[in-house]
Amino acid sequence: MSKNETKAPGRTVETLLECNARLLRKVALLESEAAQARYLAYHDSVTGLPNRVLLLDRLDQAMQQATRQHKAVGLLLLDLDRFKAVNDQFGHNGGDLLLQQVAARLLHCIRGCDTACRYGGDEFVIMLPEARGAEDVEAVKEKLRAHLSGPFRLGDHVVAMGVSIGVAVFTAGVMSCVELIGAADSAMYRDKAERVAMQHRIAVPRVTGIGHRSSGILGIRRNSAAASLGITKEFGS
C-alpha cells in the first residue's frame, strides 16, 4: 500500500471536520440573523421599545386575562408637545436622541410586567396589565408627567418638553384593543386641548396701560422658536 493510500482516510476525516465546522458557523450566523430579524419585527429601531405590533399582541393577551380574572388593564397614550420643533431645530439626530431619553424615563416609571411602546412618531403607549383600577392608572399618569417635565440634554443645549397624556381603563366587557387605544387617544386630545387652553390663559398679559401693553408686545416679538421650546444653551460645561 502506498503512502498516499494510507493517508487518505486521515485527510477525509480532517476534511469532514472542517466542513462540519463551516456548517456550524453558517448555522450560527443564520440563527443570529433570524433572531435580529425577529427583534426588529417587534421593536422600534430608534428607542429599542416594543413597537405597535408587539403592543397589540400583549394588550390582547392582557385583556383576555383581565376578563378571566376580573381585573383591569390600564392604557396611557402619550404625545410629546412641539416635537416637530425639536426636529426642525436640531435635525433628526437630535429628535432621535430626545426619543431615546424619553424611552429611558418611561421605563424608569413602570414595572417589569408593564409595557412601554413607541406607537409611532412622537407617540408612546404604556400598558398596565394588572391595574387595580382607574386610581392606579391616574397615579402612573402623574408619575409619567413629572418625570417627563424635567429638561432633556441635546448636546450642549437643554430642552424643556411637555407631554399630553390620555388614559383608558379596560374591565371585563366587550371592547377590542383598537377601541381601547381609541379611547386613550381621544382622552389624550382632550388633555392636550385643556393644557393649550390653560397655557393660553397664562400667556395672555393684562393690559393696564399703553406703556405696559407695548412692552408686552415687544416681549412677545422677542420670543423665538427656541424660546417656545424652553431651549437654553449651557456654557462652560
Image: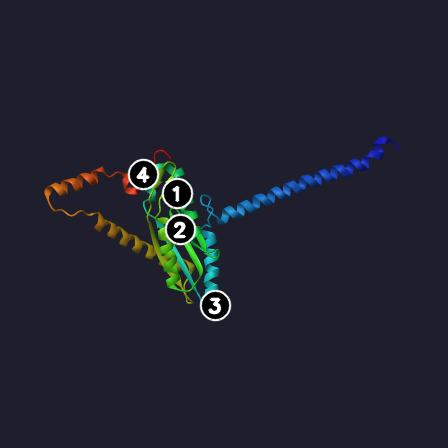
> Of residues 199 and 83, which is closer to you in this image?
199
Kindly identify the amino acid type of the residue bearing the numbered disc 4. Answer: Thr
Whichever of labels 3 and 1 marks the residue nearer the N terminus, that label is: 3
Badge 3 element: helix
Relative to 185, is 215 above or below? above
**Picture residue at 37% right of the left edge, 47% below the top:** 122
Left or right of 43, for residue 149: left
For marks 2 and 1, the one nearer the N-term is 1
Residue 98: which numbered mark, if any?
A: 1
- Marks 2 and 1 in Cβ contact (< 8 Å): no
Q: Which label sits in the foreground, 2 or 1?
A: 1
Residue highlighted by disc 2: 124
3 relative to 146 in the view: left or right:
right
- The alpha-carbon separation of the residues under discs 2 and 3 comes to 27 Å
- 200 to 169, vertically: above or below: above
Instruction: Residue type at mark 1: give it.
Output: Leu
Label 4 residue SS: strand
Q: Label 2 is placed on what type of residue?
A: Phe
Q: Which residue is drawn at 35% across and 40% down?
A: 158
Q: Quadrant of residue 92?
A: top left
Q: Upstream in the sequence, badge 3 or badge 4?
A: 3
Residue at x 41% of width, y 53% of height: 125
Q: Is residue 119 shown above or below 20?
A: below
Which amino acid lies under the numbered mark 3 shown in the image of this protein?
Gln
